[in-house]
Amino acid sequence: MPRPSPEPSPRPSPAGRRPVWILPAAALVALVAAVALLALWAAALRDDAGVVLLTGAEPFVGYWDVRAGVGTLAAVALAAVVVALGPRLAHALRWPALLAVAGATALAFAVALGAATSWGDLVDPVRGPHEYLPVVPAAAADPAGFLATFVERLAEYPIHVRGHPPGFVLVLAGLDRLGLGGPGWAAALAVVAGASAVVAVAVTLRRLGGRPGEETARRALPAVVLAPAALWVATSADAFFAAVLAWGVAALAVASTTPRPGVRLAAALGAGLLLGACPFLSYGLLHMGVVALVVPWATRRWTPTLVAGVVVLAVVAAAAAGGLWLGDGVAATHEQWSAGSGTGRPYLYFLAVDLVLLAVLVGPAGAAGLARARHLDRTTRAMVLVAAASAVLGAVGGFERGEVERIWLPLACWVVPAAAAVVGDPGRVGAWRAWLVVQAAATVVLATVLRSPW
């Protein structure tokens, strides 16, 4: 497919027209102000009786702790390369090569940020007593028994296991039975899968949007790679969840656009399996999975979605036959949440936190792009707005109160392509690079001053 030259100069704006940078700049200022105001609001709430906040770095989960090392230097070097070469390569590379470069760069950037001062920094988040690994030996020894008794024994498990379905534990148990157990393999699974979501989203935008979708993905990819979401890709289980949802949607997009019947059926079945696994990885994916419905809306082809939907129902039925009815799992987890600190988290404060942190995850370029979303191609705009609306739904529902740096990863990867809207004319390479500098700076600064548990 021929690619446009990045050289043409932008057309001069008619007299009196608002400069294109006004709305993006205002969005960036509003984001910085919102983070600062939330920090002040948290300080005012902290002394109120019965109020449960986070860990001291509100609105983030974690602690303020300035630290840097070899990994930080590697991240800065990678960011500099993306800023310098990204805009040109995004237009010059053939599509398969661009996907490979974007995926590899996203992986390298996430690893560099996660291993800021040592390799242990990358693995430590999965080693904690509240994580999934403590339950893996029992699940590996008897996967069927673990699934069948999951709800009745839920109170015995660590916090993260109590807050999620049993799917990720069973995935880790499967790795353990293959001889790939332990924190190193668990971290590798999360980081590699999470970085691959960049590729899945780009594939989806091209499949659904055709030439305009591909051009949007090309403009967005450098900013997507540098987004602050990379800080929580390395390392949280939600990065794996994001990848499963993203590849499920990508497979559905392939099934809905390919002219080859065999590929269409295989892709629809694969999409059903991946999307069917989602609610058994995180209950939040029940509402986040609405992004998949953009596929039939964009293509006007419902048959692949219906096939995938049948497979999703078959997965749910298979889990029920194994002893886990999804509704019982949701109810049991909600009971655990209500008995813990969840209800002590002020609703209005965390509603604001949840929405602002989605903007933080997609970075300055992504947040600024949202202010110009109408300039995106039709399909990308729909995907961005549906993903953002799903986050609003989750925040308004009040169950995801804080900790959304990781929880929103499955949605952030669909929102961050809005960054393409701040590029405008592909010939405006200087403005593009300026936004990439701001995007990279936000990510590296956060990685340097915030010690997150994930």
Image (cartoon, rainbow, N blue to C red):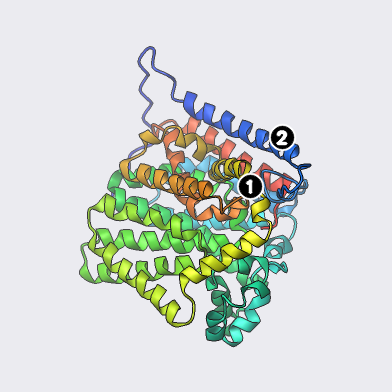
Instruction: Using the numbered discs, state the Cα–Cα distance from disc 1 to disc 2 in whole angstroms.
Output: 34 Å
How far across and how far down the image is residue 18, in percent?
Answer: 42, 19
Residue in view at x 36 percent, y 68 percent: 272
Front residue of 339 and 425: 339
Q: Is residue 92 visible?
A: no
Front residue of 274 and 235: 274
How far across and how far down the image is residue 95, in percent?
Answer: 37, 53
Q: Is residue 4 above or below residue 132?
A: above
Give amino acid for label 1.
Ala
Q: Is residue 257 above or below residue 274?
A: above
Q: Is residue 138 visible?
A: yes
Instruction: Categorize mark 2 by other alpha carbons within 10 Å: few (<14), some (14-19), many (20+).
Output: few
- Left or right of 189? Residue 427 is left
Q: Is residue 359 above or below residue 111?
A: above
Mark 1 sits on what residue? Answer: 77
* Mark 1 vs 2, N-terminal side: 2
Mark 2 sits on what residue? Answer: 40
- Left or right of 316? Residue 46 is right
Front residue of 50 and 415: 50
Residue at the far top in the pictured view: 15
Give amino acid for label 2.
Leu
Question: In which quadrant of the rendered view does residue 352 lie?
Answer: top right
